[in-house]
Structure formats: structure tokens, C-alpha cells
Amino acid sequence: MNVKINIFFCLLFLNSFSQKYSDLAITPPMGWNSWNTFETHIDEELVKETADIMVSSGMKDAGYTYIVLDDGWMTMERDNNGDLVPDPKKFPNGIKAVIDYVHSKGLKFGLYNCAGTETCAGYPGTRGYEYQDARFYARLEIDFLKYDWCNTEGITAKEAYSTMSKALKKAGRPIVFSLCEWGDNQPWNWGEPIGNLWRISGDIYPCYDCEFKHDTWSSWGFFKIAEMHKNIRQFSGPDHWNDFDMMEVGNGMTFEEDKSHFALWCMLASPLIAGNDFRKMTKETLTILTNKELIAINQDALGIQGFKYADENGLSIWFKPLQNGNWAVSFFNKNDKEINVNFDWMKHNVVDEVNHLKTSFENFQYDIRDIWQHKDLKSTKTPFKSTLASHDVVTLILKRR
């Protein structure tokens, strides 16, 4: 038996253990979700305007593909057949017409539901209707399902998400399955054959590293989320991503904080799902979200999640291995004041223990490119020096000679 046949049967054997539609998210999904800005205040006009701007602004060309309607798209009751009912006031022409419009723009469309009896906002959940809802989504021709974890008393996460995954597969339409379980039941340990991505934390909040307390739970700043779970890098990769939540870029943080947020999500190989109002988006926000050199780090073919290399005196340094022996590195200023960066490459050996990759700057030389400034710098023969404002970031590509 030749090598090609061996590989074919190995892939066939592995796929037999996978419940999900495979290979739908070989790189981290990119798109937009309605929740961070609009919560349940969504309608047909918002979707169409968002789709139009995604195309006209250059975001589609930068890689943003999915438009996902979060909680609140349906009525409070199922119909007599038990089907979900898109809200006719929000979608007077029916939600299928909206989906068709999004598809006509060369984009993909996603919806939201919940594993429990009700969604987080109190709309009908999917518990007990998994196969019926999956067929409903297939008829609508959606491409993405975000599946939340509210009102799930008495059921186990792995079983609930596994059931919905099987239902989607049975319905016969390839749909990216996003497990929004908040990390409470460690979905990275069991999620790979079930979903294409899984949330690793509770909800994000538009701040650097704060905790925003609700009655019984908290939302988190983006840096807190990034550092919340240790030692889960090995569970993330092509078609099975650690999801650090939708982005808050353009939602009230400073320009420097928005830059840091986007850079960190790119370093982490997190899905890049924008959560701002495109109709009010500033040029600065658009520049951040469409930085193609940063997006290339996120979408790198190796699919490796970056890691924190050092954290001293408020300077946090993160590395991410890239294809062709290259590396990305980001320097984050977590301080409330300006700092100077002086990084002598020759004094550092960078090791990715999970993926058995390493580099010694004494033995290998790299050309440096600043991908915020879009310019080439000196090589790693000389120390890197920069001045960083509070909560700002500088991100470099190290290209091996």
C-alpha cells in the first residue's frame, strides 16, 4: 500500500471520530456579531447596512466573512409545529430574505441559540428541539451557529453540545458550530470533535484589564481574558479554536487599547469577530480592523496560539510561531504611564514547548518589520528600542534569513 493510500485511510479513520462538519474553520473565523453593541435590538435594516459596509469598507477583502445575529432574532414562542419564529416586526420580509441578501454580497450568515430551555435574553432555547432546530437552520441556509449556555440546569455541557453537533450533521448543511459555554466545563478538553471553536471565558467588556461585576457574574477586560486560563494552547489549532470572545475594538476604549486588543487576539489565533457599529466606525477603528499584516498573523497556516514569553515591570512580551520559520512578537505596555522598550535579542532564547519550536537569536538572524508602522527595521543583530504609550503595543514580524 503506497503512502497516499495510507494517508487517505488515516484521514478517514480520524474523521470517523468527528461529529462535526470538519474543515469549515481551518483558520480562525472572521466576521461580525450583533451582541456587543446592539444586544437584542436588531433588525433587517441593521443586517443589510452592516453587510453593505463590510463590503464597501474593505473588511470583506481583509477576510471578514460572517455576519452573525445574536440573541433576540426570534419571537417569544415557537409556532404550532414547534419551529422557531423569526420576529416579524424586526424582519418584516422574513429572515430568509435577509440571509439571501447577505449571501448575495459574497458573505456568510450566522444565528444564535442556546443549549438551555431559554436563551440568555429569555427567548426559546433549543433543549428538546435539537434536531428540529438543526433542520430549521439548514432550510434557512445559515452558515454559522453560536450556541450559548444559559438556563441549562440538569444537563451536562459535553452531552448537550454533542447532541446539537450531531443534529447539525444530520441536517445535512455544513454549519460552523461555535460553542459558547464560557469555559466553565473546560470545553477545550472535549470540544474538538464537536465544534469548530469554543469560548474559554465569560463575556468580554470594553476595557483593558478590568472586571465589570453584574449581579451574579462578571464581564472581563480583554487582557484579563487573555490571561485567564493557563496551559490550554495545545488544544487550539486548525478547525478547533480557543475563542477569546467577540472584539470590543471601536466600542469606547482608547486608540492604544483598541490596538492592543486587536494585536492580542491576532497573537492568540482567536476568531476575529468584530462587535462594533460599522455605521459609526471611525477611520482609526477601520485601520485597526483591516490591518492585513496583523490579520496574516492570526490567519497563519500553522494555526499556533501565541504565548506570553515575559512579563516584567508592566511590559508583557508575547511570541507566536509562524510558517517558514518566522515569528511574531508583541510588546504590550500594561502600565498607566509611558515606558521605554530595550530588547536585546542576543540575550534571549525563545522556546515554544507545546509545539517543540525554538529559536536562538545568537545562532539565527531575522529581519524585522513593524506591522503597525508598515515599515522594515534593523535586524535582530541590534537591540530593539521603542517608546510605548500607556496600554499601547508594538508588533513585529521576525523573518528568518
Image (tube, rainbow, N blue to C red):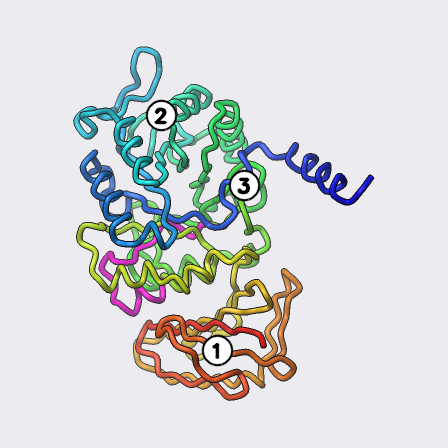
SS under mark 1: strand
Position of residue 225 relative to residue 350, above or below, is above
Neighbor class of circle 3 (other Cα within 10 Å; few <14, some 14-19, many 20+) is few
Location of residue 212 by image quarter: bottom left
Mark 3 or mark 1: name the one nearer the start of the chain: 3
Residue 336 drawn at (x, y percent): 30, 76
Q: Which quarter shows the C terminus?
A: bottom right
Three-letter residue code for mark 3: Asp
Direction bottom: furthest residue: 382
Q: Position of residue 223 (x, y in %)?
A: 39, 62
Query: Which amino acid type corresponds to the residue marked 1 in the rendered image?
Result: Ile
The CA distance from mark 3 to mark 1 is 33 Å
Q: Residues within 10 Å of mark 1 (few under 14, many from 20)?
A: many
| 75 with respect to 2 (left or right) | left
Question: What residue does disc 1 label?
Answer: 368
- Element on which disc 3 rests: loop
Check the image and report above or below for 254 versus 93.
below
Segment colored magenta:
243-261
Q: Residue 205: which quarter of the image?
A: bottom left
Tell me the crowding category of disc 2: few under 14, some 14 to 19, or many 20 or more residues within 10 angstroms, Cα based.
some
Residue 252 in magenta?
yes
Q: Return the x and y of residue 117 as percentages of the image width and height.
A: 38, 26
Q: Nearer the viewer, residue 205 or 86?
A: 86
What is the spatial separation of the Cα atoms under label 3 and label 2, in whole angstroms?
21 Å
Q: Position of residue 33 (x, y in %)?
A: 31, 44
Q: Going from the N terminus, do you reach mark 3 or mark 2 first?
A: 3
- Answer with mark 2 or mark 1, whichever residue precedes in sequence: 2
The residue at 42%/31% (across/down) is 115
Q: Depth check: 167 or 151 in front? A: 167
Mark on residue 140? 2
Residue holding disc 3: 23
